[in-house]
Image (spheres, rainbow, N blue to C red):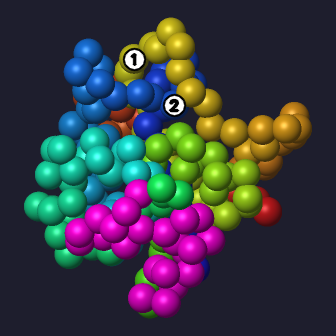
Amino acid sequence: MKTILWATLTANGNYAQSGPENPPKKEALADFAAHAKAAGNFIVGRRTFESMAGNGGGGGPFADLDIVVISKSAPEIPGVIVVGSPEEALNYLQQKGHQTAFISGGADIHNAFLGQGLVDEVIFNVAPVLEGKGLNLVIDKDQYRYKQVELLDCKPLGGGVVQLRYAINL
């Protein structure tokens, strides 16, 4: 199964943190929805899902998708599957017959997949904002190492958002 990690970064390279003072760009949200629909699923952390659910994230345009929430402590959530690890999420989607797993957030979930070498491709939407203090995406918390990537595509999405798509060379 192909795994695609999707994230929005700031122009200075931080993992973009959305909030009332810095809402997500509509172009990035539309891109997320298009990729999730194409994959037929998305994997998300509990906190990110809860913020999405407050904005209709569990229904509406995502009602027909397999949504997998990764959480070690969340109880059952109606309409989604809750699992405890990245491996369980991928196993569930593979058993459901999906060819692609779409990993959508947040930073802890992204870092868990990256750190375990479970990502084939990354899609970064770079938002036109600088962030003073932010989170980073890491491939290994304990070591300073590199992972080669291959640029597959680069395109503007509008609103100053630029998308970079990379294959991760294993």
Query: Mark 2: which secondary structure?
Result: loop
Residue occupying the far top of the picture: 132
Which stretch is magenta? 74-96
Q: CA distance from mark 1 to mark 2?
A: 11 Å
Which residue is rendered at x = 61% and y = 30% of the image? 136
x, y percent for residue 114 = 67, 52
Q: Which residue is mark 1?
A: 129
Of residues 120 and 19, the one drawn nearer to the viewer in this rendering: 19
Q: Earlier in the sequence, mark 1 or mark 2?
A: 2
Q: Which quadrant would the C terminus be assigned to in this image?
A: bottom right
What number is the disc on residue 68? none
Which residue is rendered at x = 34% and y = 28% of the image? 18
**Any part of residue 124 in sight:** yes
x, y percent for residue 42 = 39, 64
**Any part of residue 44 in sight:** no
Which residue is rendered at x = 64% and y = 52% of the image? 112
**Magenta stretch: includes residue 136:** no
**Magenta stretch: includes residue 92:** yes
x, y percent for residue 70 = 48, 60
Which residue is rendered at x = 47% and y = 80% of the image? 93
In this rendering, the label closer to the viewer, 1 or 2: 2
Q: Which residue is mark 2?
A: 15
Query: Mark 1: which secondary structure?
Result: loop
Residue 129 appears left or right of 158: right
Picture quadrant where residue 51 is located: top left
Within-10-Å neighbours for mark 2: few <14, some 14–19, many 20+: many
Picture quadrant where residue 1 is located: bottom right
Of residues 139 and 142, the one drawn nearer to the viewer in this rendering: 142
x, y percent for residue 131 = 47, 14
Query: Is 79 placed above or below 115 here?
Result: below
